[in-house]
Image (cartoon, helix red, strand yellow):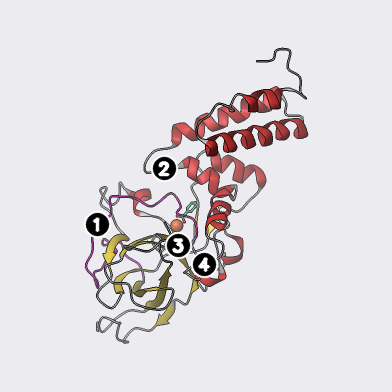
Amino acid sequence: MAIDLTEETITAAVQGTFAGATDARLRELFVSLVQHLHDFARETRLTSEEWFTAVDFLERVGHLSSPTRQEFVLLSDILGLSVLVDRINHAHSSATESTLLGPFYTEGRPRAENGADISGGVTGMPLFFSGAVVDTEGRPVADAHVDTWHSDGEGFYDVQQADRLNGETAMRALLTTDADGRFWFRSIVPRYYPVPTDGPCGEIIHAAGRSPVRPGHIHFRLHANDYESLVTMLFRDDDPYLERDAVFGVKSSLVAEFLQHGAGETAPDGTEMSEPFQTVEWTFALAPDRR
Ligand code: BEZ
Ligand code: FE
């Protein structure tokens, strides 16, 4: 390896150390990463103090990351990297558009029967969701697994109010489509909310004077044999933050009508409602699995 490396020669020297990697893709990724990182430092004339600050920042992001608090994912989200990677990988498909997963998905969600109330007892305006899963030709997909999760009417997920809920899950479930590709559930209407700003990512948001708010939405993650998995979300059509999502995830094709109904009307499950409620109907199209 060369010694006495300079600003001009160090990049090629570091890249050369990856020449022996047997994994060609790993080699390609690191050679490119080193190029861009070094160019960044040269272009910005990065100071030693700024480098220390950045390392300390990443260390704090790592310390805060856990299965229920994914600060590294949030960092990727607020820098637009999550949505960019999603766009690169799902650019031209006639399936329902995908978008970012976000940090509030959890494996520990209960299975629910179609028609179940998945609110977990959290109060809010009732919401009746009627979904269908089809292929890109419009044919129903039976036995698809549909994960859903969302915030409450004040913008909080269950994992953010674990004390109040005694650690119980709420506003999330795993459903399965019936023979006609349909699934349906009752819950409560979600609202816009700020991404968590009490950690290092919040420092960036505040320093930039950015809004931390995401428009109200319901998350979905769909899996079915022979189809590509889909991670997506549906946004409230009446949300004031649709045009300024803190993590850049809104697509017009994912804006859904949250239809308002008055007290005294009948809900889709036949319940005579004594309070106002909303309904959403949506069809998700899955792309064939090309692997
Ligand atoms: C979410 O939609 O749950 C989310 C996505 C990115 C950052 C924070 C939250
Ligand atoms: Fe969310």
Please give the label number shown on residue 88: none
Residue that label 2 marks: 69
Residue ID for mark 4 = 93
User: Which residue appears at 56% of the width and 34% of the height?
Assistant: 27
In front of the other: 27 or 189: 27
Circle 3 crowding by C-alpha within 10 Å: few under 14, some 14–19, many from 20: many
Q: Secondary structure at mark 2?
A: loop
Give the residue at x 30% y 46%: 163
Going by the numbered disc 3, the residue's amino acid type is Thr
Q: Position of residue 175 (x, y in %)?
A: 27, 65
Q: Quadrant of the C terminus?
A: bottom left
| Residue positioned 49% across, 40% down in the render | 72
Kind of residue sitting beneath label 4: Ser
Query: Which stretch is magenta?
Result: 99-125
Kindly indicate whether the residue at mark 1 contacts the one at mark 2 (C-beta within 8 angstroms). Answer: no
Secondary structure beneath disc 1? loop
Sequence-first disc among 2 and 4: 2
> Any magenta on residue 246?
no
Of residues 170 and 233, the one nearer the viewer is 233
Please tell me which of labels 4 and 3 falls first in the chain.
4
Q: CA distance from mark 3 to mark 2?
A: 20 Å
**Which amino acid type corresponds to the residue marked 1 in the rendered image?**
Pro
Amino acid at dot 2: Arg
The Cα atoms of the two marked residues, 1 and 3, are separated by: 19 Å
State how far apart marks 4 and 3 are (Cα). 14 Å
| Quarter placement of the N terminus | top right
